Amino acid sequence: MIAAAPTSQRAIDLVAMAHDASHYLLRPHTVATPTSIAQVAELLAEATRSGRPLTFRSGGTSLSGQGVTDQLLVDTRAAFRGIEVLDGGERVRVQPGATVRQVNARLARHGRRLGPDPASEIACTIGGIIANNSSGMACGTEQNTYRTLESMTLVLASGATIDSASSDADEQLRLAAPELWAGLSALRARVLADGESVASIRRLFAMKNTMGYGLNALLDHERPIDLLVRLMIGSEGTLGWVGEAVFRTVPVAPLVATGLLVLPTLAAATAALPALVDAGLATIELMDATSLRVAQTLSDAPEAITALTIDRHAALLVEVHAATDADLALGLAAADRAIAGLPLAAEFAFSREPAARAALWHVRKGLYPAVAEARPSGTTALLEDIAVPVAHLLPTCEALEAMFERHGYENAVIFGHAKDGNIHFLLTERFDTPEGVTRYATVTEEIVELVLAHGGTLKAEHGTGRIMAPFVERQYGAELTEVMRALKRLCDPAGVLNPGVIITDDPHAHLQHLKTTPTVEAEVDRCVECGYCEPTCPSRTLTLTPRQRIVVRRELAAAEARGDDALVEALLVDEPYESVQTCAVDGLCGIACPVSINTGDLVRRLRSETRTPGRRVWNAAADRWDATTRTASAALTVADALPTPLVRAASSAARAVLGTDVVPRYEAGLPRGGARRSRLLDTSSAVRVASPVAPPSYAAIYLPACVGTMFGPEGADSAGADSDTAGATAALLALCERAGVTLLVPEGIDSLCCGTPWKSKGHTAGYASMRDRVHDAVEALGPSAAGLPIISDAASCTEGFAGLLAGPSGRVIDAVTFAAETLLPRLEVLRRQGRVAVHPTCSTQELGATDALVAISRAVADEAVVPEAWGCCAFAGDRGMLHPELTAAATADEVADLARLQREGGDFDHAVSANRTCELGMSRATGLPYRHVLELLERATRPASAAR
């Protein structure tokens, strides 16, 4: 017996999964989360037997409405994230829930990558790129999913499962689905017998084309199993499901040069395309005049754009890719010849510098977030795409610009993959008014007429979905549309697989179920529900993701507005734990978000508005922080001396009374308490505690983290007793002494804190009190200290100080960055430290300190390894003790990745990070003793005479 797939009908699960990146909204009646291909097969078989429809959903980044339903929604991301590199990276076996970025990270060390390169690679999954036949900025039609997928394990509507790589796969298909097997050959014969059909298919699929089914398969293949495999690509879950696939990978070009061509008009830009394409440029990205005006608002826009007085200008972002220096020189020479005669409106040069290249790409990739972020609250951002023959690109773009102006779409931008004739345009629309819907309907009809008049395709990359399903026959004609309908009937005789997508009888389907975006919270109203935040979220497999936290708030507001009291009540029952308590407020979502939304800001405010036991205690503690940290240290030391079951029972009893979000759960493995900061500082010659100071030579202002007082170092029998495990503060002081560097510490350091405990919990009064105290202590050092960098030795504390001291104070950097920049060049590594596992943290990412963390690790180790699946550990101060299940879920992928790395390369001699609580979380999750990287640096550079 196959265990039934887990399902849910909780209101919070249904509304959370209802929203994707498209502008359509349907709420499923049930969400299923299968854990095996066999369970998916049973779901398909039952749907066919019962006639009850289902829709598959993976990353939720599709833009055309192909991932929403009011029936059964099947989540194929959660349990299907396997990646297996084959043949030294030449091929890769992947499951549908793995993201493109995750797959490419596994392939990177082999110098390979997937062919499809969609801009949403951070979040879009393999299931989606197969279902949509994704391509991207550089892959064209030569390296898209259709061309690079080698084989797949597919599940038919009947539940039959076939691996197309099997030598007898075609026979398996004949036996499992004889009508489908014969019908595929008959459809192929039908198309081949019609010269007009063949010509239409060849013309349309010479471009990027994801409109309708991939009928080019009927010309390219003969065996029914091969036909079915290729027809599944781009079928958007309407013909079956792909449970696993093998891709042929493509080489990564190690050498890249990037430049921005600014031309006086769109006509001049499009006229330049033939010569640039002939020169072999790997990437040619078009931006129209409105795009350039938007780009001028970006903080790091290059001078070639900021210096322009934009009239009718256009720009082409171009790249040369090469495997060797010689090939790059040849490519650049060819490009220079093509560019030489162009009427450029600004100076041009190729750059190989990473920072310069990143700034140019930020111009191109920053268009979407810039327009989306600036859109009026309550409007929806619509990102559409089409393709036309390159010769028709200019009149198409000019007509689109005139159309958008005529209909009042302000700041509508046009950009795209010019060498493919594939352009995107971004509009903002209001779907909560009849006028907005009418305008959208009118413009859609005009776009259809325009694109088809120029011999183009209505969907180049984003899939047909619901948005273009009514127009399939307009593009393909009656005969080929009937071939598609016949294919649908063959594969899905019960009509239960994603009905209404690709094939529809409703000419107004694209105007049904449009998503409105109510104004809810200032922190998150600009969210476009793209899902880029989800893969990095620590709670993604436990409760909700940032996107889902936001849509729950939107659904609450909408339900309250329409008087749906039952839904409001149901959501409010589950929201506190699902949304608020299990958010790590780590900020990684803000880094991934194209419009820079840190959902933690929303969660912190919600916490501040909640009546929480212990708030008065926390706020009072801000004024007695020295005593508080010493009490916590003593409590841990006492707890360490008592039997673990006794302490755990006491903490569990307190949690039962006061709440699991108030009282931490004690577990074995927590360390003893640490040493008071002033005690460590008093014994070091590398610091001076003073206020104010004279100008002499101090390298930095040092604010040691109080977390080292509360939590002693890893493995020490008592605070500071073992010199190899003395903690980050002691290690930094020893390193400074060794390097001849002096630090300046404000007076009263034992009473200072970065404020993060109060800020993360929403205790605003305590945070304000601590902010004022720290600011006064730093200011008391006097004007001579004003230019010094400010450092702390726990990354989350450094991030806290950076926010707390924002303004006139000096540059706040983490001790890891300070050590890499200032100490490491003055130190000699005396003992290599073997194989080291490195765990970056959310704060090292936010601070830009991850490179320094890795650099120090590599400087002292024989091999320093950052797991590809690393992510926030979600220990988050005490959050991992309040909700241990959060840290367990957050670290699961990294734990599995570390196990793989140990199988492949042997055990780790050390494990390091840059934050004490993260080290606790990772030690608990992995069983490896994580320490601060500065402790390893101190050990590696310690003279033999100092060893103990």
Image (tube, rainbow, N blue to C red):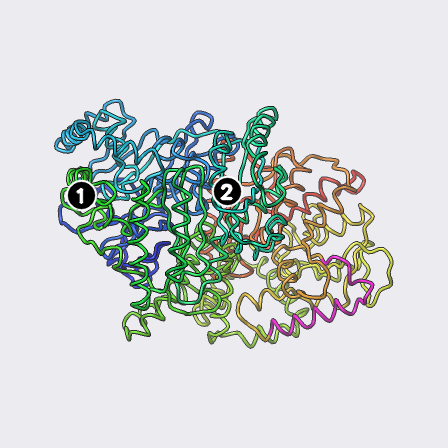
Quadrant in the picture for the C terminus: top right
Residue 265 vertical placement versus 610 (above, below): above
Between residue 679 and residue 395, name the one nearer to us.
395
Residue that mark 1 sits on: 45
Q: Which span is picked out in magenta?
A: 766-790
Q: Percent from the top left, x then y, of residue 848? A: 62, 50
Work out which residue is located at the far top of the displayed protein and give it: 167
Residue 929 in view, yes or no: no
Q: Which of marks 2 and 1 is in front?
A: 2
Spatial CA span between label 2 and label 1: 56 Å
Dot 2 corresponds to which residue? 268
Sooner in the amino-acid sequence: mark 2 or mark 1 = 1
Residue 345 at x, y = what percent?
Answer: 59, 45
425 left or right, relative to 24: right
Q: What element carries label 2?
A: helix
Asked if residue 786 is positioned above or below residue 455 in the image, the reply reads below
The answer to whether 583 appears left or right of 66 in the picture is right
Hey, what amino acid is under mark 2?
Ala
Determine which quarter of the picture holds residue 31: bottom left
